[in-house]
Image (spheres, rainbow, N blue to C red):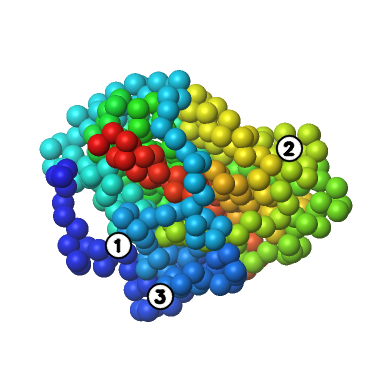
Amino acid sequence: MNAHRARTPATERTRRWFMNRSLLLGGAAAVATMTACSAGSSDTTGSASGSAPSGTPSRGPGGAGGMGPGVTEVKYADFTGLTTDGKVADDLFSIHSSGVSTDAVVKAAQAFLDGLSAKVRRASVFDVDDDEWLAWSNVDGYRREGARMGDLTDKQRNLGYALLGEALSADGLTRTRNIMKLNAFLGDYNGGGRETLTEGHYYFTFMGTPSTTRPWGFQYEGHHVAVNYFVLGDQVVMSPTFMGSEPTSATYNGEKITLFRPETKAGLALLRSLTSAQRKKVISADEKGGTDMVAGAGQDNLQLAYQGLAAQEFSAPQRQKLLDLAGVYVGCMDDGHAAVKMKEVEDHLDDTYFYWIGATKDSSAFYYRVHSPVVLIEYDAQSPLAYGENAQMGGSGAPSGRPSGMPTGVPSGGPGGGIGGGTPTQQHIHTIIRTPNGGDYGVDLLKLHLDTDH
């Protein structure tokens, strides 16, 4: 077993019941104030039938929108993954050569680990099948394990960014770094002095030892970011990957940052390419609630039936727009392995469903889902959580002592202000990509590896 600080019952209670405890003590307002990002007030449960799976609360801690994990957290040994009906589809994944080398990411991971102190390294390395894989959350106040970026030296941090640079595409790395920067913007806007709302409150953990032959992986997570990266030989699984932000556009340290425009535009492009008859099958409602995401943190064994319209009913141009949309999300991983994943997505294109909630204007807040046997993508424009609703804030309208740069039309306010109510907006977006049928965290590949190689 790898050496790391053991999780005591008290620690487990802190991590697994963090959000539940907050709800009991202070209600939803306390949760939103403490975390700056909660699951909102959706009535969506995420089960195939519209009600929560047996033993899983329909709302509350670890909610489908990504608060989690909370009480819905699944143990690794009990993981089956996202399915349509509780039954894992067979023969979707196999151990084979992808033809794309993982040497660079293995080398970068080892260099990062070698650069850590012995104490931090021990606290950051877990077994390859540890429950730590599933214990991620997108909230800022969640209790995390591993090497915290803000506690590392510049050299150590740079080695961490070098690892991300090998694992992610250039766009994926930029997206991740910009989410971190806007997290710091949020901290400054809220008055500063909060350890969690900074660029430094992001953690690396490692499952197994970096190797070109043996299974291993790493997790990078913090507020609005969770990257799970599993490696077996030259095969890579990078899911679940959660990315979000509030705000999604602001000026931080003189840099104008705008996030999720490709995801927004590609979703609209596909929807607008559909005929009126097709749209009637795809769009379930013209207005959306505060939160519609169903496959967030803690929802690892979610049962979710297909909804919307299957691509077998799309024209060739529409099918291409669907592939373009999937490519925006898959394209966060390194280019070579992204191409491998996109081939997998294309192989199941006929069985890929597109689903939509909300209006369809450029500025509308909406939700969409792409769902097939091998990929689940969700995009959710949510209600404001971090700002009140009493004032509008532009570049020159920031409260005294707070940073400028919030786009006009974004609600602002001090403590006690916006805690999750109000009209959804593109200034608060959550996204996730998963691999259904046991593929997340590379679990299916690891099982195949153990069955065939041991």
In the picture, measured across the screen, residue 344 lies left or right of residue 227, that is right
Instruction: Determine the residue located farthest toward the right in the rendered image.
Output: 276
Q: Residues under labels 1 and 2: Cα distance? A: 42 Å
Q: Which one is in front, 404 or 318?
A: 318
The amino acid at mark 3 is: Leu
Residue 15, numbered label: 1
Numbered tag placed on residue 319 in the rendering = 2
Secondary structure at numbered mark 3 = helix
Badge 2 amino acid: Arg
Above or below: residue 10 compared with residue 325? below
With respect to residue 436, does 102 lie above or below? above
**Number of numbered discs on residues:** 3
The N terminus - image quarter? top left
User: What residue type is disc 1 on?
Assistant: Arg
In the rendering, at what x and y percent does residue 61 appear? Answer: 42, 69
CB atoms of marks 1 and 2 within 8 Å: no
Nearer mark to the viewer, of 3 and 2: 2
Residue 330 image offset from top left, x and y in percent: 55, 36
Q: Which residue is mark 3?
A: 23
